[in-house]
Amino acid sequence: AAFAERAVHHTGQVFAEPSDNAQPLLTSIQTAKTSIHMTMYLLTSSSYVNALIAQKKAGREVKVILNQNFPTTGTSNDTVFGQLQAGGVDVVWAPPGFNYTHEKTVIVDGASAWIMTMNVTFSSPTANREYLALDTDPDDVAEAEQIFEADFTNTPITPAGKLVVAPTGAREAIVAVADSATTTLDVEGEELSDGVVVSAITAAHDRGVAVRVVLSDDTPTSAMANAVQTLKNDGVDVRKLSTPYVHAKALVADGTLAYVGSENFTANSLDSNRELGVLVAAPSEAAKVQSTIAGDFGAAVTY
């Protein structure tokens, strides 16, 4: 019961990609009436850049936070930063206090927040397994706005609402989902190496919960290889999927409570990045995530 209180109410909706090229997100931006506030790890899609500039020219308040630093060369928001600036959009680089601002959030009209695993790129909604949560709970949207404003002005903030926020409290929320599972636990992630999260998954398996884990088929880091081996040694069925590419970060307990967000299941993501996620308790939406993971699990191969 305490957990449902943290979770988004029945006003939420979850979209699984690839399915509709994330068209509802683009339409939401294009039809905004007053404001668009975006925090994005990677923004390369010209459709979205053009929509943001068009809305600014139409008199909307358009403010964007972009991540500046990337772990690999050749990935950059520099060009888009310049395009937005030239189009009159209020755009800033993310606060330097985080390792990466890996968050992917769009707040529209102060009334809805898209909290996503998905970057706004050409390929993400067409080639990747992604989850987009449309959160219209007023408390959640207000908290997302507070985080946005703090990051936009490079002001410290310690969120205290229901959202799953890194680097403050995300690990605890994700582990609590796993700990709440009594019958099934479904996990889907691009990366999985955090020891506390891995322990929560094995603990669920050890108490008789049916656990399914689907991971990307990327070459794992040594930490992830160790985590996978720990799970397999415990008897957890771990599989990897090549198509669609697993960029998801999701976890579902008992088919009724889901975590969806930008947080990967890694120590860096949970301890050093700005990340944002949400707990989804609306039965139809949690079931949607579970059924998608189940389908991916069935199509995946043993890790």
Image (cartoon, rainbow, N blue to C red):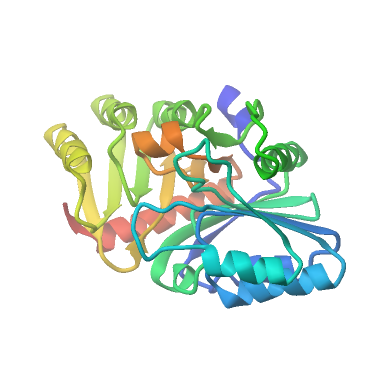
- Residue 30 is left or right of residue 192, and the answer is right
Judge by depth and name the residue closer to the eye, 291 or 81.
81
Residue appearing at x 16%, y 31% in the figure: 234
- Residue 110 is left or right of residue 254, and the answer is right
Q: Residue 83's x, y, as percent?
A: 64, 71
Q: Residue 157's x, y, as percent?
A: 65, 29
Examine the rendering and report whether any part of residue 256 can be seen.
Answer: no
Judge by depth and name the residue closer to the eye, 124 or 54.
54
- Reply above or below: 23 against 78: below
Q: Quadrant of the N terminus?
A: top right
Residue appearing at x 23%, y 58% in the figure: 217
> Quarter of the image holding residue 251?
top left
Q: Residue 72's x, y, as percent?
A: 34, 57
Judge by depth and name the residue closer to the eye, 134 or 258.
134
- Residue 87 is left or right of residue 74, and the answer is right
Judge by depth and name the residue closer to the eye, 145 or 297.
145
- Residue 211 is left or right of residue 48, and the answer is left
Q: Residue 74's x, y, as percent?
A: 37, 66
Residue appearing at x 14%, y 38% in the figure: 229
Residue appearing at x 31%, y 33% in the figure: 194
- Reply above or below: 165 against 191: above
- Reply above or below: 120 against 168: below
Examine the rendering and report whether any part of residue 138 can be seen.
Answer: yes
